Image: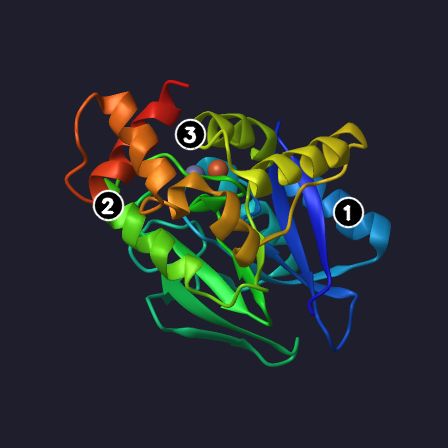
Amino acid sequence: MLQTTPVPAFSDNYLWLIHSPRDPCRVAVVDPGDARPVMDTLDREGLTLDTILVTHHHGDHVGGVAELVKRFRAPVFGPAGERIPCRTRALADGDRVELEAMGLDFEVIDCPGHTAGHIAYYGHGCLFCGDTLFSAGCGRLFEGTPAQMNASLHRLAALPSATRVYCAHEYTLSNLRFAAAVEPDNDSLQAYAEQARQLRAEDRPTLPSTVGRERQVNPFLRCTEPAVVAAAERRAGSAMEDETAVFATIRAWKDSF
Ligand code: ZN
Ligand code: FE
């Protein structure tokens, strides 16, 4: 299992550090939206930045890239379909990121929806999924269609249930409030909400989650569950044609929740 360190940034981002299994003092950073907190953590913990991994082009995910490259000369991996500052390697679906010196190896999964070129990194039983999958929620559709996002989430949800899910934002409690409105009778959801509230009360991250848990609590991964279909139909006031319609309805509902 990978050792990771969350670096909190802005109001609710986590910039994840991934420690090398060979040398825990060498790290990769995922989506460094701000260089300052990353550098502070590196200095404080005596870490060296080896590699930068980017999931998509939004400022809160790439804003610190240039400054970190200037200081550490780290290679920058990012999606081929987006403009990523200082990118040295453009990644497409199925590519592998083999960081030999660090002993890290990730597979690239295309997951369009939040942005058109969004990618996720999967390896060592861990998934770094940026703003595609959140705990109990999913990213807003800025550039993609509901069908695309639903298909992307399907791919992520099909990973082994023990997979740890490293999301880029601490949105869990507000997502859980919405999830409970969709599925008020989901017991796993209520138990998880209790646990998440406890963690946040102690100022601890609710992340990583797991794929298995998300399948049980995340309404956006549950668009074929009768309770979720029924909630979407109540919301829309009409029957749902297919799973994509369910997804589109609850995504739009969440946007105004
Ligand atoms: Zn984003
Ligand atoms: Fe973001």
Closest to the camera, between mark 3 and mark 1, is 3
Whether the residue under disc 1 has CB within 8 Å of ligand 2? no
Q: Badges 1 and 2: C-beta atoms under 8 Å apart?
A: no
Real-space Cα distance between discs 3 and 2?
15 Å
Disc 3 + disc 1, Cβ < 8 Å: no
**Quick one: label 3, few (<14), some, or many (20+) residues within 10 Å?**
many
The quarter in which the C terminus is drawn is top left
Q: Residue at x 48, y 48 (%)?
A: 130
User: Residue 6: x and y, percent?
Assistant: 69, 47
Q: Is residue 33 above or below residue 77?
A: above
Q: Which residue is mark 2?
A: 243
Q: Residue at label 1?
A: 41
Question: Is 73 or 214 nearer to us in this picture?
Answer: 214
| Image disc number at residue 182 | 3
190 or 77: nearer the eye? 190
Q: Amino acid at mark 1?
A: Thr
Q: Amino acid at mark 2?
A: Glu
Q: Which quadrant does ligand 1 occupy?
A: top left
**Disc on the earlier residue, 1 or 2:** 1
Q: Residues within 10 Å of mark 1 (few under 14, many from 20)?
A: some
Horizontal and vertical percent for residue 163? 57, 63
Query: Which three-letter amino acid code belongs to the residue tagged 3?
Result: Val
User: Does residue 190 appear in the picture of this structure?
Assistant: yes
Q: Residue 44 versus residue 238: which sits nearer the camera?
A: 238
Q: Residue at x 29, y 30 (%)?
A: 232
